[in-house]
């Protein structure tokens, strides 16, 4: 009887191992061979479209949470965005823990003091002078970051005091699976450039999806925005929003690799 129980236990351990193995993504599988080879060479792929004719994200990996973004795009009708920007990053898997990454993304207050390269100032400077969670989409009463438990289905609101875009409220929503964590920011108040109201509420969407593959970690980011079109202002907004993808990724990747 003991031998029989041991054999059964061994069988289920092996079954669980192969099930976990088969359910894990490979980076090449979700990115495609061409993009995977480019990422292996460069560590990053970028695609930007200004005033696109259709709202599509060409670099989306083939994963569950990335497909959620694709579904949202397909159902989101209306005026075409002024900008669609995508970045994909490939980093060694090492000892990156999904739950720790989940806590980092929910720790909005730790974004305060984040650095970025300012095209206007031509040097590295602080991106967010203030960053913290707030009570609601319009209520700037400060509250604690929600970091307990799973991030799946969580929604919180935050204020980001941006170096060039001023104070803006965002809705931040999350999804989490066994292999992935995603974060989406949508502005709930207007975005100003200097004293100009450049973006209406709900017209800046920033997504981040981190996928732990069996060989690498893939981080996909995008921005979709519709803003006031006027010469120099339009170009400044394009550069500012694209710079924020790299800034958020750099902040996030440094913490998950520590």
Image (tube, rainbow, N blue to C red):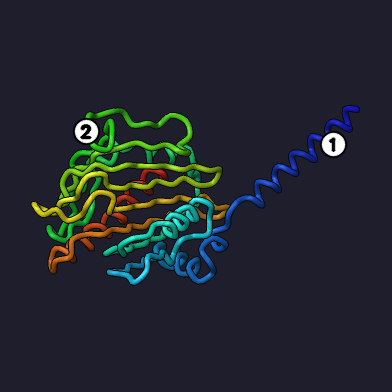
Q: Which mark is residue 7?
A: 1
SS label for mark 2:
loop
Residue at image position (75%, 43%) is 14
**The N terminus is located in which quarter?**
top right
Labelled pair 1, 2 in contact (Cβ < 8 Å): no
> Which comes before the other along the chain, label 1 or label 2?
1
Out of 157 and 215, give the one closest to the viewer: 157
Out of 16 and 134, give the one closest to the viewer: 134
Residue at image position (71%, 48%) is 18
> Relative to residue 178, is residue 242 drawn left or right?
left
SS label for mark 1:
helix
Out of 142 and 56, give the one closest to the viewer: 56
| For residue 95, above or below residue 139 | below
Residue at image position (28%, 30%) is 135
Residue 228 occupies quadrant: bottom left
Residue lying at the far right of the rendered structure: 1
Out of 168 and 214, give the one closest to the viewer: 168
Residue 159 occupies quadrant: top left
Q: Which mark is residue 164?
A: none
Residue at image position (35%, 42%) is 172
Q: Which mark is residue 140?
A: 2
> Relative to residue 199, is residue 217 drawn left or right?
right
Whole-number angstrom distance, CA of label 1 to CA of label 2: 60 Å
Q: Position of residue 240 (x, y in %)?
A: 21, 58
Q: Position of residue 17 (x, y in %)?
A: 69, 44
Instruction: Report the mark closest to the observer, 1 or 2.
Output: 2
Q: Residues within 10 Å of mark 1 (few under 14, many from 20)?
A: few
Q: Position of residue 230 (x, y in %)?
A: 14, 66
Residue lying at the far front of the rendered structure: 78
Q: Position of residue 156 (x, y in %)?
A: 35, 36
**The C terminus is located in which quarter?**
top left
């Amino acid at each position: 009887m003991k031998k029989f129980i041991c054999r059964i236990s061994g069988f289920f351990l092996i079954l669980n191992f192969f099930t976990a193995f088969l359910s894990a993504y490979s980076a090449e599988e979700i990115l495609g061979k061409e993009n995977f080879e480019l990422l292996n060479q460069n560590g990053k792929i970028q695609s930007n479209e200004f005033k696109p004719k259709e709202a599509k994200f060409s670099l989306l990996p083939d994963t569950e949470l990335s497909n959620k973004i694709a579904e949202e795009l397909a159902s989101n009708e209306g005026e075409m965005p002024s900008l669609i920007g995508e970045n994909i990053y490939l980093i060694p898997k090492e000892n990156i823990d999904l739950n720790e990454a989940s806590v980092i993304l929910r720790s909005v207050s730790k974004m305060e003091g984040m650095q970025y390269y300012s095209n206007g100032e031509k040097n590295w400077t602080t991106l967010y002078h203030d960053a913290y969670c707030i009570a609601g989409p319009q209520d700037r009463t400060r509250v604690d970051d929600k970091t307990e438990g799973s991030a799946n289905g969580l929604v919180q609101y935050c204020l980001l005091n941006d170096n060039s875009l001023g104070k803006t409220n965002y809705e931040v929503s999350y999804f989490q699976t066994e292999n992935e964590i995603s974060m989406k920011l949508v502005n709930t108040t207007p975005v100003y450039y200097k004293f100009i109201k450049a973006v209406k509420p709900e017209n800046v969407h920033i997504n981040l999806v981190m996928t732990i593959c069996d060989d690498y970690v893939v981080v996909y980011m995008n921005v979709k925005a519709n803003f006031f079109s006027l010469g120099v202002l339009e170009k400044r907004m394009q550069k500012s929003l694209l710079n924020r993808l790299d800034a958020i990724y750099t902040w996030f990747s440094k913490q998950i690799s520590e």
